[in-house]
């Protein structure tokens, strides 16, 4: 789809399109698939965003910039991990005499992120996802830290077929 967008034929939204499939039921299969998805997303971000921006500049096309910006959004769990790390560093720097401005800006960002998540939950998934389950999301984010560290050390580049219970 990105190759087509670069040559002037971007994808179009189709409201009637549906993608269905069974998710893996076994923990190891789910982890394998999640790793493949997340590593693929990050690899696409790292390789295709520069390519799209280069083409956007060469062709003077804002639509390619928009696609690049869309691809630049990391997975929400990674965004939360990066926010947590930046906040910890800012707090440490502030504690040893650095400015408190980064801490305040990161606190504002964290608050906005939390409000955004709660608003999206309230509007779209309140019936399907109980509040108690939503409150367990921080544990899920912590579970993903090794997955992201693995991307830095040894990214998954080979496709591994995921076992299905179906």
Image (spheres, rainbow, N blue to C red):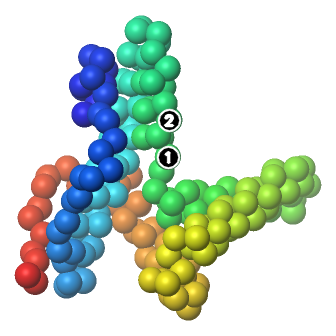
Residue drawn where x is 27% and y is 73% of the image: 31
Provide the residue designation for mark 2: 69
As drawn, 163 above or below 26:
above
Locate residue 81, reporting x and y percent. Answer: 56, 63
Q: Nearer the viewer, residue 25 or 138?
A: 25
Other-residue count near label 2 (Cα within 10 Å), few / some / many at <14 / 14–19 / ≥20: some
Residue 156: percent from left, percent from top: 23, 55
Q: Residue at x 9, y 75 (%)?
A: 163
Q: Is residue 111 visible?
A: yes
* In-image side of 42 versus 131 (left or right): left
Query: Which image quarter is the C terminus in?
Result: bottom left
Q: Is residue 110 above or below residue 56?
A: below
Give the distance between the C-alpha atoms of the residues marked 1 and 2, in whole angstroms.
Answer: 7 Å
Residue 85 appearing in the image: no
Q: Residue at x 27, y 17 (%)?
A: 7
Counting from the top left corner in percent of width and height, residue 97 is at 91, 55
Q: Residues within 10 Å of mark 1 (few under 14, many from 20)?
A: few
In the rendered view, does 57 fall on the left or right side of 3?
right
Furthest residue to the front?
A: 16
Residue 70: percent from left, percent from top: 47, 40
- Decide: marks 1, 2 in contact (CB < 8 A)? yes
Is label 1 in a helix, a strand or a loop? loop
Residue displayed at 42% across by 70% down: 144
**Mark 1 sits on what residue?**
73
């Amino acid at each position: 789809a990105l190759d087509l967008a670069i040559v002037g034929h971007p994808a179009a939204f189709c409201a009637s399109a549906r993608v269905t499939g069974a998710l893996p039921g076994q923990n190891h299969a789910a982890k394998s698939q999640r790793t493949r998805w997340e590593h693929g997303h990050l690899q696409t971000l790292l390789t295709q965003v520069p390519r799209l921006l280069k083409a956007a500049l060469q062709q003077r096309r804002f639509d390619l910039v928009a696609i690049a910006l869309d691809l630049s959004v990391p997975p929400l769990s990674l965004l939360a991990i990066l926010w947590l790390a930046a906040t910890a560093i800012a707090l440490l720097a502030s504690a040893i005499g650095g400015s408190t401005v980064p801490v305040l800006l990161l606190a504002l960002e964290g608050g906005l992120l939390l409000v955004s998540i709660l608003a999206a939950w309230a509007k779209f998934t309140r019936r399907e996802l109980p509040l108690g389950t939503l409150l367990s999301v921080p544990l899920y984010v912590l579970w993903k830290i090794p997955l992201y560290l693995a991307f830095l050390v040894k990214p998954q580049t080979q496709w591994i077929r995921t076992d299905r219970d179906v």
